[in-house]
Image (cartoon, grey):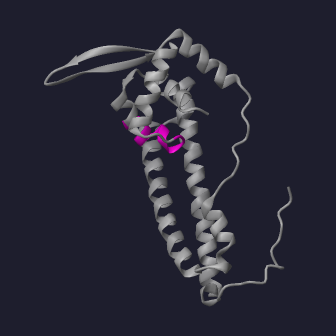
Amino acid sequence: MALEHAILVSLRERAASGSDLTRRFDASIGYFWTATHQQIYRVLGRMEVDGWITAEVVPQADRPAKKVYAVTDAGRAELRRWIAEPTTPDPVRSTLGVKMRGASYGDRAALLDDLRTQLDEHTKRLSLYEFLAARDFPDPDVLDDADLDIYLVLRGGLLMEEFWIRWLTEYLAAHTRTDRTDRTDCTDRTHAKELPR
């Protein structure tokens, strides 16, 4: 997915300025597709040149005027085309997963400390998602169209955080239970198992 498509989705939900989009990326869509302030503004300029969005200059009291972006017919057509396009499954790339697999060859105690920090972050994010779900979608059974889509993506985020919390908790508990942190570097790799392809 290109950043352009994430911006089109956000602007289809509601017209916005570049700073509004940045806040949205920080608070919602950014949990699935991150972008910096500079990236967003650079891509907005390109999308305007391509005719996918249009900008209206809106005066502000005591501040410079701002551009508010909205999706054009061409942008809506591009978003429809992209949504209908078959999606290639995202490859699973987890630095943490590779470190966990290789912990026997390094400083396991340092990794376990890192995993505790990661577990805390995922726990906080789960709490945030639960708060957003309760606040914004108190009765999900009555949702339809865009509201249902937004809620179901939030549910995906909840499930993802629950996965990370369960996995990290299991890993930490197993190493606490077996007290494997005192082992030195394991150079015999004959025990390593290959996963089926």
- The stretch drawn in magenta includes residue 4: no
Q: Does residue 105 lie above or below 152 as drawn?
A: below
Asked whether the viewer can see residue 188, the reply is yes
The residue stretch that appears in magenta = 23-33
Residue 121 on image: x %, y %: 46, 60
Nearer to me, 62 or 134: 62
Q: Residue 25's image quarter?
A: top left
Instruction: Residue 142: tell me if it is visible.
Output: no
Q: Nearer the viewer, residue 97 or 124?
A: 97
User: Is 38 located above or below residue 56 in the figure?
Assistant: below
Q: Tell me how many marks there are.
A: 0
Q: Main secondary structure of the magenta part?
A: helix
The residue that appears at 54% across and 25% down in the rendered structure is 146
Q: Is residue 44 left or right of residue 111?
A: left
Relative to 154, say whether 191 is above or below: below
Image quadrant occupied by the C terminus:
bottom right
Residue 66 lies, in percent from the top left, at 28, 21
Q: Is residue 44 above or below residue 124?
A: above
- Looking at this view, name the residue that lies furthest to the right: 196
**Location of residue 167 in the rendering, given as x and y in whole percent from the top left corner:** 63, 65
Q: Is residue 179 left or right of residue 119?
A: right
Looking at the figure, which quarter contains the N terminus?
Answer: top right
Who's the residue at 72% across and 33% down the image?
Answer: 87
Q: Residue at x 36, y 28 (%)?
A: 18
Report the residue that reaches farthest toward the left: 62
- Residue drawn 55% across and 11% down? 74
Give left or right: position of 78 versus 43. right
- Determine the residue located farthest toward the top in the rendered image: 73
Q: Is residue 25 magenta?
A: yes
